[in-house]
Amino acid sequence: MSIYIFVYPVIIVVLSIVLIIINKRNKAKSTHIKLDEERKKYLSYKSELENEDFKILKKWMKNAPIDAFTTASFPRTNSEQIQQLAKQGIQNIALSSIGVRYREVETPAYLVLSGKELHFLHTDMDGDLKQHLIFGPNRLEVAKIKYTGLKKAALSISSKESEKYQPHIFLLSFNINGEKIEIEAHDRLTTTIGFTGFLRENYYQKMVKNRVVGEQLILKLSEKYSNLKIDQILN
């Protein structure tokens, strides 16, 4: 029993030192990254991510082209409204599942721009596709968008320095038969990095790729629909 009393403090001290070293290393690497230069590699990064980390989107989109994509979420107050829409089978919104039961735990969701259509893909706890909503031009032309700030779930990330790679939220609002539906579009792709991922040498480079690819969804959407135009992507 007495051994553990001495071992635990040592482990905590060692882990603290390791985290400090890793954090300094990552901070040093981040200062050399120039986003404007990285953005020139968008097509290369997009191809890499949609064929590796996010290859499941190709399967879900079937033969539809993927012009841009990012991760997404929705305010929990909307869950019952979206569920009701699924039950009603609202015209002009294609649903791949009817009457989906939403859970309190936030599961991965994505927005995919394909031509003039915006696809919202929502998964279950097992990562399987449970709902596929398609917003066509008639919905998008009257939709609204506003910036609402940093995603609150991201505020627990390890440091203020890494905060620049966490998602900012652009809230898309749709009025469907009198019901206001809101979906949170992330200005960068988010993935579960985990502690081991944070330790890897390519941690910040991965974050940059997620940023460069994910922010294009908002930009390309605003190019197609003037009512969804934003002033600029946050730097």
Image (cartoon, rainbow, N blue to C red):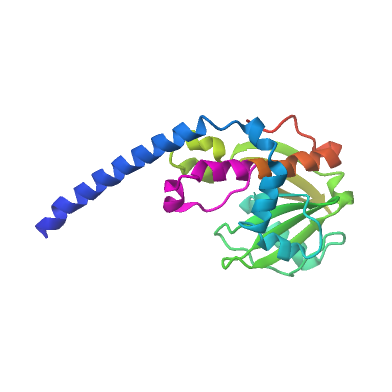
Q: Is residue 50 within the magenta segment?
A: no
Report x, y in % for residue 8.
Answer: 21, 52
Up the image or down, 66 lies above or below 144; here it is below
- Residue 186, can we see it? no
Report if residue 173 is visible in the image: yes
Looking at the picture, how far across and down is residue 221, in whole percent? 79, 43
Q: Residue furthest bottom?
A: 98
Which residue is found at the position 49% from the left and 37% from the top?
A: 162
User: At 74% from the left edge and 69% from the top edge, which residue is drawn?
Assistant: 97
Q: Quadrant of the C terminus?
A: top right
Q: Is residue 142 above or below residue 117?
A: above
Q: Where is residue 103 shown, x and y percent of the image?
A: 58, 63
Image quadrant in which the N terminus is located: bottom left
Quarter of the view holding residue 23: top left
Q: Report which quarter residue 110 is drawn in.
A: bottom right
Q: Most extreme residue toward the right, as rendered? A: 138
Q: Nearer the viewer, residue 183 or 215?
A: 215
Residue that sits furthest to the left in the current view: 2
Taking 143 as reference, is 232 left or right?
Answer: left
Report whether 49 appears left or right of 222.
Answer: left
Task: Pick whichever, 14 or 127, lies toward us.
Answer: 14
Q: Tell me: 109 left or right of 194.
A: right
Give the image location of residue 229, x and y in percent.
80, 35
Q: Which residues are magenta?
A: 186-211
Residue 192 colored in magenta in the image: yes
Q: Residue at x 68, y 55 (%)?
A: 50
User: Total number of numbered labels?
Assistant: 0
